[in-house]
Amino acid sequence: MTLHDTGYVDAVLVHGRFDFESYTEDLFHKLALAVPPSLSKALPLRRAEFLAGRAMAHSALQALSQHTTEIPIGSDRAPVWPKGSVGSITHARGHCACFAKGDPGWQVGVDVEAIASGHALESILSMTANQCERALIARQTAIPPDRLATLLFSAKETLFKGLYPVVRRFFGFDCAELRTTPSDGCLRLHLTQTLCRELPAGESYDIRFNITADRVLTWLAVRRVRSKCA
């Protein structure tokens, strides 16, 4: 398990690995984590991912001096964070992370992705990047194309998570655009559409990131908008 420098005050980012082959049901008891009723019929992989995510979340909250025995699943399937905190959980192919902030006046998002290759990389490029973004990925030399494409996908996922509490509806990858090469651990996305009055087209968001040989990790914190779009 690794603690990352988040670049935000009163915030914690925890990243770790989990091995599905090592998962057993008694790990919930050993880690003092509750199994929600909605997971009673879930496949073992889903239960293992949930366990890993909640373990990361509890570690992040403890680092923020917030102690809780349960982080329930809300009506929209998002975690319900204890009073005085906000957070986001992500997992992908054995990676897991939680970004939490000890201030409910913020919205946060986090995403982790394994570096894409082959058909997965082609799918990311066609699904995530528009023509201008694909041209940018192809011509820049600062970040290898496979890593930048994966990073773009992850950053847009993080933006969605960060803005969803206000938008309260699905919005696609085409709603945000990368216009410059990321640098110094920061990627800037611009809204291409007005999601609501509080989130107009042209608004930009700086997504922080960390890249290793096998994965990208992205996170974002934005001040909470007073009213909801929906």
Image (cartoon, rainbow, N blue to C red):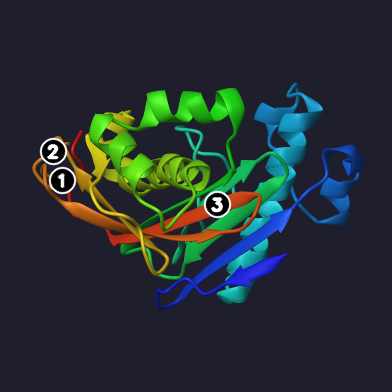
Which quadrant: the C terminus? Answer: top left
Residue type beneath disc 1: Leu
**Label 3, on which residue?**
216
Q: Secondary structure at mark 3?
A: strand
- Which quarter of the figure has residue 41? top right
CA–CA distance in space, label 1 to label 2: 5 Å
CA–CA distance in space, label 2 to label 3: 30 Å
Is label 3 in contact with label 1 (beta carbons under 8 Å)? no
Residue type beneath disc 2: Cys
Q: Earlier in the sequence, mark 2 or mark 3?
A: 2
- Which quarter of the figure has residue 175? top left
**Label 2, on which residue?**
196
Neighbours of disc 2 within 10 Å: few (<14), some (14-19), many (20+): few
Is label 1 in contact with label 2 (beta carbons under 8 Å)? yes
Disc 2 versus disc 3: nearer the observer: 3
Please provide percent x and percent y for residue 47. Answer: 75, 35
The structure residue drawn at horizontal position 45% and vertical position 40%, both measured from the top left corner, is 149
Q: Earlier in the sequence, mark 3 or mark 1?
A: 1
In this rendering, the count of numbered labels is: 3
**Position of 93 relative to 70 (above/below):** above
**Position of 66 relative to 19 (above/below):** below
The structure residue drawn at horizontal position 40% and vertical position 44%, both measured from the top left corner, is 152
Disc 3 versus disc 1: nearer the observer: 3
Neighbours of disc 1 within 10 Å: few (<14), some (14-19), many (20+): some
Is label 2 in contact with label 3 (beta carbons under 8 Å)? no
**Label 1, on which residue?**
199
Please provide percent x and percent y for residue 8. Answer: 40, 74
Neighbours of disc 3 within 10 Å: few (<14), some (14-19), many (20+): many
The structure residue drawn at horizontal position 26% and vertical position 44%, both measured from the top left corner, is 166
- Which quarter of the figure has residue 84? bottom left
Tell me the tag on residue 118: none
Give the left or right position of residue 196, taking residue 3 as reference: left
